[in-house]
Amino acid sequence: MQKMFGRFSLLPVLLLAALLLAACPPAATPAEPAAEAPAEAEAPAAEAPAAEAPAAEAPDSDAVFTYWGGLIFSDTANQMLVDRITQWGEEKGIKTDVVMINQNETTQRVSAAIEAGTLPDALDMGTGLILQLIETDQLEILDDLYAEIGEAHGGWMPSVAALTAVPAFKGHQYGIPFGIGGNVLFRRADVLEAAGYMEAPQTWEELGEMAKAQNPPETYGIGFALSNVGDANLTTTMLQSWGGRIADDEGKTCTIDSQETRDFLSWITTAFADGLFPPGATTWDGAGDNVAYQSGNALFIANPGSVYLYMRDNDPDLGDSTKYSALPGGPVMRIAPMSSPNLRVIPSTSKHKELAMDLFKYLADDEFMAEYYYNAIYGPVAESYKNAPIFTEGPVHVGLLDLVENGTPPAYPDVDNVAFAEYGSNFLTPRMVQRVVVDGISIDDAIAETQTACQAIYDKYQ
């Protein structure tokens, strides 16, 4: 077990039993917590002066303030954000237009809006996309506002402060954090214990053996996405736990072509060939793993908590049959990756920058955030937020707090830079798996293709 994982105590916390974990209603518009990794990359070509947080501008009765929020798997949490921004607008005497978008589509939507000149006044995103946007000065610097909001809420959690101190930001802050998370392993204890598996799997290989307790087509053992969605980037974590790396220690040269990658691919493609994955896993959308578990069709999933929310509110029997643990380890190391913090940002084209800063302070209210976290799937980003009751009462949220306090950085052990973020946003590890299990090419050929595609990305940032 790696040194950084040694303090990660999710496993004993989450093994508390049949309490339920975080989820969202299956009817919710599919979206995932932003999965882009924070990164270290070259500095933007030019730095704008740091934006201060003055009193909000005088309202214009004809003004419309547009906000793009990132959908998560909780209808309640999504509506809370819409209602809170609407309430703020009413208090300010301005019209608001809140658009909730699938976080898998954020990069595409932002790119199109930049071309069309239609970026909103403020929006949610992860540090990976921020890294790409600051290279062309698309975002406001929010140093003073970041400091002000952090101080007002007891300071930022140390891991959050570290993850937003991206070297490529050159000491600046481009967003205000509001949520951070990561995956927890869900397992169908009723099925697995009946088959003699009383404890959580400690390794991915052990999980593969336990998955054979499946009974297809009623149940399949491994409910992990292998498609082109953020959830499927779990395969990168798995590859790393086998000792594989995306790039070298300098974060410049891709190292996909390795024996460790071959060993990982051999394991996961064999598991797929053995029928341990549901048939649609290679084409799932962002809700595929949620639906598989909520319908009783998967014995294992990795989830940040949305499935717990669903079970808590809609299926307590399934919740009673579920137990939770930290992600398993591989032959080389065990990793507990935190996600990139979710942040609120202000485009440089915003017509209402002062109002946006005022809104960010309004959204940071402790009481609102306590209720928001109860209905969402995030760990706390500020010290005052961890006092919310859910972080002592909800088993997944207890685990998410523990993850925020003790987990590993998103890219670890790789270098967390813009190239790594782009590698993930192109889903190159799950695509590599798809090339073998769907297209039937050899492991060696799949690795060679991925090595070439990976290096092309990293070369862009040399």
Image (cartoon, rainbow, N blue to C red):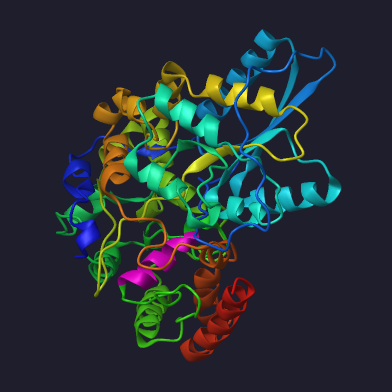
Decide if residue 4 is on the left or right side of residue 458. left
Is 61 one of the magenta-colored residues?
A: no
Residue sitting farthest toward the front? 49
Identify the residue at image location x=68%, y=24%.
354
Left or right: where 106 falls relative to 7? right
Left or right side of 299 for 203: left
Where, by quadrant of the figure, is residue 220 drawn? bottom left
Residue located at (43% from left, 29% from top): 150
Q: Is residue 202 something one can see in this rendering? A: no
Measured as percent of width and height from the top left, residue 441 is found at 55, 87
Residue drawn at (51%, 81%) of the image: 436
Q: Quadrant of residue 41?
A: bottom right
Main SS of residues in magenta: helix
- Spot occupied by residue 189 in the image (x, y as percentages of width and height): 23, 49
> As rendered, which of 171 and 121 lies closer to the eye?
171
Instruction: Say if residue 349 shows up in the picture.
Output: yes
Between 204 and 4, the residue placed more toward the observer is 4
Q: Quadrant of the C terminus?
A: bottom right
| Residue found 55% across the figure and 64% down from its top | 227
- In the rendered image, the quadrant that contains the N terminus is bottom left
Question: Would you identify the image quadrant in which residue 156 lies?
Answer: top left
Does the segment drawn in magenta span residue 238?
Answer: yes
- Left or right position of 71 against 247: right
Q: Which residues are magenta?
A: 232-241
